[in-house]
Amino acid sequence: MGLALESEFCHYCSMRTRTTLEFTNVSKTFGAVHAVSDLSFTVEPGRVTGFLGPNGAGKTTTLRMLLGLVRPTSGTATIGGRAYAQLERPLATVGTALEASDFHPGRSARNHLRVYAAAAGIDSARVEVVLRTVGLADYADRRVGGYSLGMRQRLGLAFALLGDPDVLVLDEPTNGLDPEGIRWMRGFLQTLAAEGRTVLVSSHLLAEVQQTVDWVVIISRGRAVYEGSLDGLETGSAVRVDSPDRSALAAALTGSGAQVQTTDDALLATGITAAEVGAAALAAGVPLSLLTTESVGLEEVFLQLVGSDDAMTTGEVSA
Amino acid sequence: MIGALKSEFLKLTTVRLWWVLLLTLFGYVGFTAGLLAGVFGAMGDQLASSPNAPQLPADGLPPLIYSTVTVVGYVVPLILGALSVTSEFRYQTLTPTFLAGPRRGVVLGAKVVVLAVAGAVYGLGGLVASMGIGGSILAATGIDPQLGSADTWLLAGRVVIASALWAVIGVGVGSLITNQVASIVVVLAFAQFIEPILRLGASIWDWTAAVGKFLPGAASDALVGSSIFTSLGTGTTAVQSLDWWQGGLVLLGLGAVLAFAGFLTSWRKDVT
């Protein structure tokens, strides 16, 4: 019954092929560096999936394995069940904009797109369409070497849209865009997803994609640390509390089942309400000098998940 | 495959390199052919009456001058072929290339075909210079430029084939030495320095000459059938040379081996 409903639904909304991306136990080792370790997740159609992690977490390597550019050491990455190299019309199935600016600086934007349209058997009329879509039509005959970073991002997106693909894979698409461009990109990605396409967007900044994505996969040091909705990420609140006898307070809170972190000027307790903190302190006979509830921001949860502090101090970010 | 061919053709024609190099070839060959035609045309009589001067075959002058396209100019299609590959590595355009055409062998095959055609066009462009400029100067000095001779036009045809093969060899070189600067340095050093020395050295003994005739430049001259180098050979032994078709096979084989080796190494690597 669910099937019938869905096919009827899709009959009205779009005839687009709904394509799922599947990463199954993917690993990649470059020499001694484990870029990606045993990574598994799926990307569903009809929504924008954010692929988050700090720089050097293995995002780009993961995407390049999906696209057949990098061979996994083990595991598979498939598009609708097939490896990229087995796609009959690759650009019409997956549109890609990778972070690196892969342009010949002496070639114009229009010719850049014509070169790859020809290779993929796409009518050159599409070149004009995508140039207009990304707002480059007026600059299309300029050599790409003179383009700003924002214009290159738009050209990258034009390349991704060339085949009117069912899947879009975009690596850091908002890099180099001005605030207006970022806003435009947000709306654009949501429109694409609403049309039934599968949209996978990587970023190292949660804030950049926070308003765009419906689902997130967070990786750190080549491993998945979270997969789910953004709501699921929000741990709600923590209680900031302090006492002249801080260690006795910490013991009391831990005893009542809270997770306690020591910050510079107080204790931060999670998994416990302010009222419960007060009761626990009273029962233990510990005087309180501070008791306040504060919400834990998404960004903080994200940073905790990816352990950015560790990475910074040990220098693994660049590894 | 048709899409891949079209794409490689567009890659070549949408950046300025191809006509910059073609003009270079035209100028280089035109200058060399014109100079040779002028010097030998004007001084032919004096040279003939002076027994110590290098002697030229009586009616060998026009082919000698027309063949400068590949004899001195082969390095230009060679560099075009090498750059067609190294620029993909340098500007990371292999990423969109392999996204649009994931079958890498097909991409390399299309590149080889398109560069062979481009090399042939270079051969034609070079012939316009060598036959146009060189031939005019020959005619002006009172020597028959032999433009009506079938042999001249057969030579022109073999020049076109040799130039096409050099561009294919360039694709192979670029696939093996993917660093653009290193690739150009190796090509120039080999073509302008190492090979001429090897060819000169090889002409000392019979057995080295038997090996030396397989050097790519020597094979190219054999294919074309005329060369200022072999005509002015100062070695004490008779100049050894392959048949024209053997020379062609040596170049073809070299191009095929280099391109295949490049495919097995750099073309199959991860694109990061």
Image: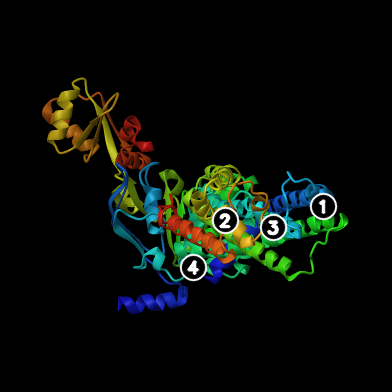
Labels 1 and 2 in the same subunit: yes
Q: Earlier in the sequence, mark 1 or mark 3?
A: 1
Residue A289: % across, % down: 25, 23
Of tags 3 and 2, the one toward the viewer is 2
User: In which quadrant will I find the N terminus of chain A?
Assistant: bottom left
- Circle 1 residues within 10 Å: few <14, some 14–19, many ≥20: many
- Residue B240 circle label: 2
Helix, strand or loop at mark 1: helix
On what subunit does the disc labeled 4 rest? Answer: A
Query: What's the chain of the residue with tag 1?
Result: B
Which residue sits at x=70%, y=64%? B156
- Determine if marks 1 and 4 fall on one subunit: no
How crowded pointer 4 is (Cα within 10 Å; few <14, some 14-19, many 20+) is rated as many
The residue at which mark 1 appears reads as B41
Total number of numbered discs in the rendering: 4
- The residue labelled by disc 4 is A92
Could you say which is closer to the camera, residue B12 or residue A165?
B12
Q: Are the two marked residues, 1 and 3, in contact with CB atoms closer than 8 angstroms?
A: no
Mark 1 and mark 2 lie on one chain; the one further toward the N terminus is 1
In the rendered structure, are the residues bearing label 4 and label 2 in contact, judged by CB atoms less than 8 Å apart? no
| Front disc: 1 or 2 | 2
Distance of mark 1 from mark 3, alpha carbons?
Answer: 16 Å
